[in-house]
Image (cartoon, coloured by chain):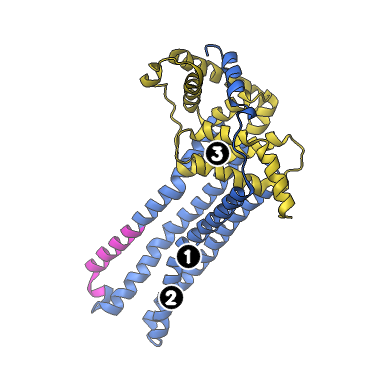
Chain colours: A yellow, B blue
Amino acid sequence: MINGDYKEEFLQHINGNTGIIHRVCNIYFNGSPEREDVFQEILYQLWKSYPAFKGNSKFSTWMYRIALNTAITHIKKKARIPRREELNETYHQLPESIGEDHKEMNMRLLYTAIDTLSPIDKAIILLYLEDYSYEEIALITGLTKTNTSVRLVRIKRKLEEQLRNSI
Amino acid sequence: MESFENIKKYWEKNTGEEIGFIPISRQSFEEVIRKKISKEQRNVIAYFWASFVFQVVTYAFLSHLFIKYWGNDFIMLWSLAGIIFYVPFTFMLLHKIKCMKMMTAEKLNSSLPDIASNIKNQYRVLFSFFRFKKFFELFLIPAICFVFIVLVFKLYVPGGAEANLAGFVIAYIIIVSIFCLAVYAENKKRFKGPLRQLQLILEDLGENNEI
């Protein structure tokens, strides 16, 4: 089964959705030396699970499931406790700039704000930002749809507050 | 980025596929897979040896005494007692390790779990193994240390344990303490830390009462 064509097919699928692995790594391990290791671990887990992919769901949904599970499992292994803190003064005082620098700074602020969330809240907000419906988010996380929507309201409010203070 | 809808729009604009990540080449993919498989095998072997080497040494030592002191009933009896006492635990330990590895493999081959089920499953497997390990350590460490000390005193201390009771007790306490410290450090790193992390995630999921 593990032949050249099979590998090519897998790589084509993955390369069409590489952004998913990058986004999961950025959400959980942004700026961390573990990021590269987690990226490779996700790729490896995807490859190991690929024979079980029957196409019952979208490839991207399947990828998110594996990538999020791998990232959260890695947190367990490395005993990395979520920061759960407000954005610090350095971020509050960052000056606004223009163009690419401004974009980069805003993305950094957004990732930093998301980094203060718990691992499950990070998964929920990432899926929401990626346009997944409440049903799909509930299916991927294992939460109920009601719980997902309640948590999303809370997460959104928290992120809005943090980002409002930081700009 | 005041309102969340603006945040969402901003996210969509700046994190889409069009950003152009470097595609993963076949060569780098194969390199990653090779590296990961080798790492996974190393981890399994390291874990196996960590738990098995001490037992091999114990069996070797006790068998050696049993053969060397053939005819000395006291040494033979205690050596044999140590071996017989240890065999079921070795068997159970290997069986548990095998089950743990098989559950992980089965999980990979079965339908893909959601995050909550995956975390609950990981917690169950790890907790079950840790509970068995604690039980194993609680009985086996004091018992096997006792057998060792009895044999060492009989063979190398004139008069044996009976004539040196205080020394025997002190030696026993020291060796048990060393074992306990080693086990405590190992459990903290391999079990308590990861279990605490999983518990935190389960609490966050609101699943802690259903494990």
The answer to whether tags 1 and 3 share a subunit is no
Is any part of residue B207 visible from this angle? Answer: no
Q: Which residues are magenta?
A: B162-179
Write the residue at 23% across / 74% down. Answer: B163
Q: Which residue is mark 3?
A: A71
Secondary structure under tag 3 reads helix
Q: Chain of mark 1?
A: B
Query: Which of pointers 1 and 2 lies earlier in the amino acid sequence?
Result: 1
The answer to whether tags 1 and 2 share a subunit is yes
Q: Label 1, label 2: how many angstroms apart (C-alpha)?
A: 12 Å
| Magenta-drawn stretch contains B166 | yes
Closer to the camera in the image, A10 or A83 = A10
Residue A127: percent from left, percent from top? 62, 27
Write the residue at 61% across / 50% down. Answer: B27
Write the residue at 31% across / 63% down. Answer: B175
Residue A30: percent from left, percent from top? 48, 33
Q: Residues within 10 Å of mark 2 (few under 14, many from 20)?
A: few
Q: Label 1, label 3: how many angstroms apart (C-alpha)?
A: 31 Å
Secondary structure under tag 1 reads helix
Is any part of residue A83 visible from this angle? Answer: yes
| Magenta-drawn stretch contains B124 | no
| Amino acid identity at mark 1 | Phe
Depicted B151 relative to depicted B107: above or below: below
| Amino acid identity at mark 3 | Ala
Q: Label 2, label 3: how many angstroms apart (C-alpha)?
A: 43 Å
Is there CB contact under 8 Å for labels 2 and 3?
A: no
Q: Which residue is mark 1?
A: B52
Depicted B140 relative to depicted A26: above or below: below
